[in-house]
Image (tube, rainbow, N blue to C red):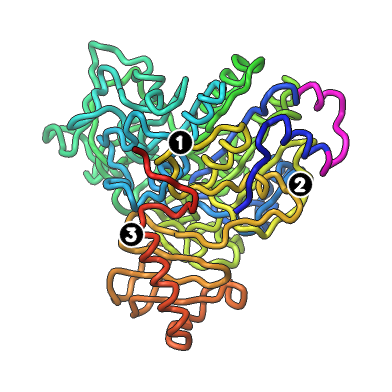
Amino acid sequence: MTTHPPTLLASFFAALFVFGSYSQSRTDAAERPPNIIVIMADDLGYGDLSCYGATELETPNIDALAAGGQQFTQGYCSASTCTPTRFSFLTGKYAFRQPGAGIAPPNATSLIEPGTETVASLMKRAGYQTGVVGKWHLGLGQGDAPDWNGELKPGPLEIGFDYCYLLPTTNDRVPSVYVENHRVVNLDPDDPLWVGNNRPDENHPLGSDPEVRATLKMDWSHGHNQTVHNGIGRIGFFTGGHQARWRDEDLADAWVEKSVDFIEANQDKPFFLFFASHDLHVPRMPHERFQGKTKLGFRGDSIVQLDWCVGELTSTLKRLNLDQNTLVVFCSDNGPVLDDGYQDGAIEQLHSHKPSGIYRGGKYSIYEGGTRTPFITSWPGTIKPGKSDQVVCTVDLPASLAALVDQPLPAGACPDSFNMIDVLLGTPNAKGRDHLLQQPNKGPTLALRVGDWKVLSYPDAKPRKHLTYEKGPGRYELYNLADDPSESNNVAEQHPDKLAELLARLDAIKTAGHSRPDWTEAN
């Protein structure tokens, strides 16, 4: 495990020594701590970007981040679904340790309790202005359900964020409204918002009704056939709040607008921004100006829209002369999926595109395609351009960013987050993780990578066929990723001792309650 220099000033001088002299503007910018932006894509696979080998589309803005910074070939998210990865990114804690940390339903209340140490609270304690814009999907409020017509608290502001502008759940789940800080935006009190688990009355139109389905602008394939909004069926039921409802096509513009506002408002002080994109999550309905930009259908068009979002953020930093003093981390919450409930052409228009690259599986799986995703760090003048094969993970960002700003981790905080800041900054000879736990939605299905070896552990030996993967019979699978990165040859029977060793290590991590060696329990 690497350690970071004891003071922020020392870290800057170390960077000067390693990477050479800065421009005068960089030296001036270094007088204050660096701004930090974490851009988390949604359902973006390892092979979905041109800088990671995609040939059917181009992502010039993300490619520019990679070309000017560190592009990781072994960068991971901590889970292959959204809520668990986002929980782990914020808390530095594997989501399987948290009851209820599976994919959150529409009426979920706050998953992260107030007072929990998060990457946002660590940054705030270090003097940063903190904001989150985009997809939340970690629940809001408390009790039986969120108070959609009142104060939606606790939420991001109770765990370290100063500002939030949110998609409260996901764009395929109700309610289809924006939340700013503690309130639904533009909600008319005379048209209250109701969200529930059951059809409110027999006249409430459903996407499963044949006459309604015939009018949809995007048809469903499975599961997304309850409340219809914007011509698209959703998961869950809601009524009212018509003035507050958004259009799918406008979501990316809203995230960029509010993020630019946040950056401009805080340009004279250090800030931390979590830009939580909804691209490429279903329903994929990019803005009209991006529709048809690729031959891959709306999924490919959504990748181009995501790339545009990244370009808008980076151009804002340049316009405000902040780019030389801003660390940008680009990652994804999980691997790719094609048909995730809508008939949007993702399969039919795939052509030769390989969303997971050479890796097996995707979203929902513990194969590499589910959690090995694009991972890029960029900080012009500080991070030397290059590619890294060191293992890093989104769960490591709390400890790593805290080290960057000289903020010690309190006892009990971030039990699975490792300080990888030297690796993220591209420091020569810095070492990444030697092991990493991977999970899908929730336990007991888990995988553990130790060095090049990886064990997959299922609750039983049944064959499984899911949206992005298929496994044969057998409770355990064992692979050597150096020899078999595509996980095509299960060698569990050939290496029983290695299998037993990794299963014992996995069990130890599960029962210990932490995996960070220097973690201490709170009093």
Amino acid type at circle 1 is: Pro
The residues tagged by marks 3 and 1 sit, at their Cα atoms, a distance apart of 22 Å
The residues tagged by marks 2 and 3 sit, at their Cα atoms, a distance apart of 41 Å
Marks 1 and 2: CB-CB under 8 Å? no
Q: Is residue 374 left or right of residue 495?
A: right
Rendered residue at 59%/67% (across/down):
358
- Where 235 sits versus 288, above or below? below
Q: Earlier in the sequence, mark 3 or mark 1?
A: 1
Give the foreground label among 3 and 1: 1
- Where 369 sits versus 455, above or below? above
Rendered residue at 28%/27% (across/down):
141
The residues tagged by marks 1 and 2 sit, at their Cα atoms, a distance apart of 36 Å
Amino acid type at circle 2 is: Ala
Which range of residues does the magenta coloring cover?
17-29
Q: Which mark is residue 67?
A: 2
Callout 3: SS: helix
Identify residue for label 3.
Answer: 511
Callout 2: SS: helix
Q: Earlier in the sequence, mark 1 or mark 2?
A: 2
Q: Which mark is residue 410?
A: 1
